[in-house]
Amino acid sequence: MMDAGHAGPSRGLDDLDKPRFLGTGAAMYTGLTVALYPLHSQKTRSQTATQGGPRPGLLAPGAYRGLAAAVMGALPARMCYIFALEAGGHHATTWLAGRGLKPEAAASLGGAVGGASAAMTSMLVYVPFDIISQQQIVSKGTPESTLAIARRIVSTEGFPGLYRGMGITMITYLPSSALWWGLYKATHKSIERTSPLTPTLLVEVASATVAGAFTSTLTMPLDAIKTRTQVQSANGGEAVHFVRVARELVATDGIRALWRGVFWRGTHTIIWGCTMVVCYEQLKRWAAKTKPLARSRNE
């Protein structure tokens, strides 16, 4: 990922103090997960609600259901995400620039590659925790514990049940992450080129807002289908393929049901993106290795 604003040339992963960068970054993003969890919870409840059913408020009882499972998965998943994002994005951008691509195009495509790599890597870690967390969010009555849900899923569906919906999850988050980082890079470069005196913080926030608004809206139907696929067995329902889930949802509630909860997802994505990217860029500067000064010939 290129450096933000006017901070100089892009840094690669080798230019960063990895323990400081990955450890602090994972902890920072986990804290952000906790802070914005009610928005995620509300989005999940909206997506799984029936047409005309009740719509609980943002801070209704149960707004933090599933948080423990989400945090347990978030910490290792974020470390994987940050590593893959930085390594994949930097190498892709460098390779594309070396092939004669313009800086804006190289940064945008490199960001997309880094985002897709990060999403794929982190999903392998996070999906089981995501399934458990979402089932706790939509459960009726007192939710089962994280361990109890994991045991139930494995006993009824086998270990692959912990990765139920992995196909639609990849279909959702690979293009979503690639699109977000690609749009962020392109917008960032465009603002730098057309308005070079714009403050760095404003450039980062504006770029993240554009990326978040477009990405959350365009990929909302995929996220709605993914969520419904993963929570099917929460209240004793039958686990079916995501294609059938999509057909039944549209047949029952209409095409608009695919965008149910888009406000909550968009709000979560924009706030998350703006906070995350500003902290991320500052973290890269803070974790940059200090290069030793060259010694004088007379020494």
Image (tube, rainbow, N blue to C red):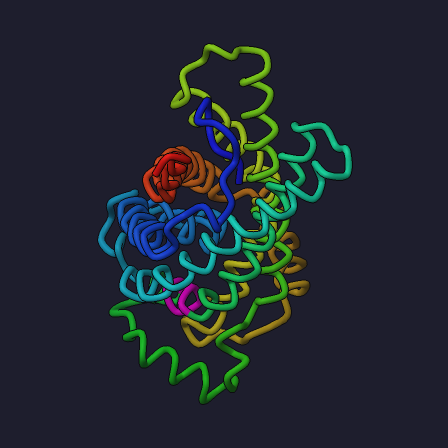
Residue 271 seen anywhere in this rendered image of the structure: no
Whole-percent x, y for residue 78 in the image: 41, 56
Residue 16 visible, this orientation: yes
The residue at the far bottom in this view is 155
Residue closest to the eye, 26 or 211: 26
Q: Determine the residue positioned at 48% across, 27% down.
A: 8
Quarter holding residue 256: top right
Stretch in magenta: 129-134
Above or below: residue 148 compared with residue 3 = below
Q: Residue visible at 45% across and 89% down?
A: 155
> Main SS type for the magenta part?
helix
Magenta region includes residue 105:
no
Pick whichever, 105 or 29, lies toward us: 105
Please name whichever residue, 85 or 169, is drawn nearer the observer in this view of the structure: 85
Vertical placement of residue 281 versus 226, above or below? above
**Residue lying at 29% horizontally and 53% vertically, measured from the top left:** 27
Q: Is residue 226 left or right of residue 283?
A: right
Q: Residue 70: x, y in percent? A: 34, 61
Residue 102 drawn above or below residue 154 = above
Quadrant location of the C terminus? top left
